[in-house]
Amino acid sequence: MNFVYYTAAGPKVNRPPLQNWKPGAGAKPLLSVYNVPMIGPFLLTETEILIGRDPACQIALPLPPISRRHAAVARGAAGWRLRDLGSANGTTLNGAPVGETAQPLRPGDLIELAGAARLVFELSPEGPLLRMAPCLWIDAASHEVYVDGSRIEPALSPAQFTLLDALFQAEGRLLSRSQIVAVVWPGVDPAGVSDEAVDGLVKRLRQRLRGAQGSEMLQSERGKGLKLVRM
C-alpha cells in the first residue's frame, strides 16, 4: 500500500511507503522540493537557511514568481521556524499565509512559495537519503525505485539501477556512451562493450519504467547520449 502524504489545506504529494521514512536517532531536518526538477532535498545544516531566486541563497529556486530573497527557515531553542522576507508573492504554511513573524515547523509541514514551489519539512530517514526528482525516488541503501509513489517490482537489475542512479546524479546532463560504459562496466575496456549491450540495457530500463508509466523520464539524443528529464 502506497503512502500518500497531504495536508488538509494543501495538495497531495505522492510518497514512498511510510516505513522507508522512519527517522533514526541521528535524523536531520531537511526540505524536499516537489515540483522543481532535479533540485533537493536540502539538509538544514546551518542556523538560518535563505530560500529565494538569488543564487546566493542556500536553497536557490530559479522561478520568476519567487523573490530573490523570499523566505527563511531558522533554528532556535524551540526548533525550526519559517518566516517570509517581505516577498512580492507570499509564502504559505499548510495553506495559511506566513508573514515576517516566524512560524514553527513540524515534520510533514507543506511550504509554498509564491504558488510556484512546494517544499516539505521532514526528517531524514536512517541510512542514505532517498534521493528524488519529481515523481522519482531512489533508495541508495535498498536499491528500491519508486515512480509516482509506486515501487517498481521486481527490483531493477544491478546494471539497470546503476545506470538510473548515474543518470539521476547527472542532474539532467547527458551521459555519453563512454560514460555509461565506465559507470556500468567499471574496469572493462570500452572497446569490449558492444553498442548492442548498451542499447539493450537502455531499452530494458525504459521497459521497466514504462510499467510504472515513467518511460518519458529517459531521453536519448542521437550521437550525444542519454539523460534523465522531468516527467
Image (cartoon, grey):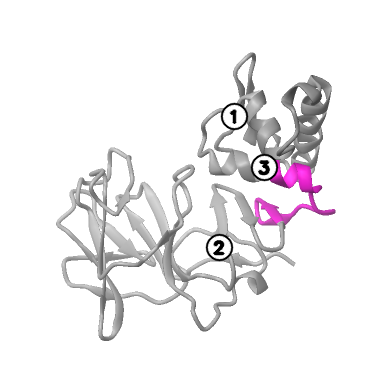
Residue 214 seen in this snapshot: no
> Where the N terminus falls, by quadrant?
bottom right
Foreground mark, 1 or 2, reads 1
Residue 93, percent across and down? 34, 66
Residue 98, percent across and down? 25, 66
Residue at x 81%, y 35% (from the top left corner):
204
The three-letter code of the residue at mark 1 reads Leu
Q: Earlier in the sequence, mark 3 or mark 1?
A: 3
Of residue 180 and residue 172, the one placed in the foreground of this image is 180
Q: Is residue 144 above or below residue 204?
A: below
Report whether 18 appears left or right of 104.
Answer: right
Q: Label 3: state its secondary structure.
A: helix
Please rate how many residues cluster around mark 3, counting C-alpha atoms within 10 Å: few if below 14, some from 14 to 19, many from 20: many
Contact between labelled residues 1 and 3, with CB atoms less than 8 Å apart: no
Residue 155, percent across and down? 80, 53
- The answer to if 146 sits in the magenta stretch is yes
Please rate how many residues cluster around mark 2, counting C-alpha atoms within 10 Å: few if below 14, some from 14 to 19, many from 20: some
Q: CA distance from mark 2 to mark 3?
A: 16 Å
Q: Label 1: state its secondary structure.
A: loop
Residue at x 24%, y 62% (from the top left corner):
72
Q: Label 2: state its secondary structure.
A: loop
* Label 2 sits on residue: 129
Q: Earlier in the sequence, mark 1 or mark 2?
A: 2
Give the magenta range. Answer: 145-164
Quarter of the rendering containing residue 32: bottom left
> Where the C terminus falls, by quadrant?
top right
Residue at x 72%, y 37% (from the top left corner):
187
Residue 10 seen in this snapshot: yes
Q: Is residue 123 above or below residue 210?
A: below
* Label 1 sits on residue: 175
Contact between labelled residues 2 and 1, with CB atoms less than 8 Å apart: no
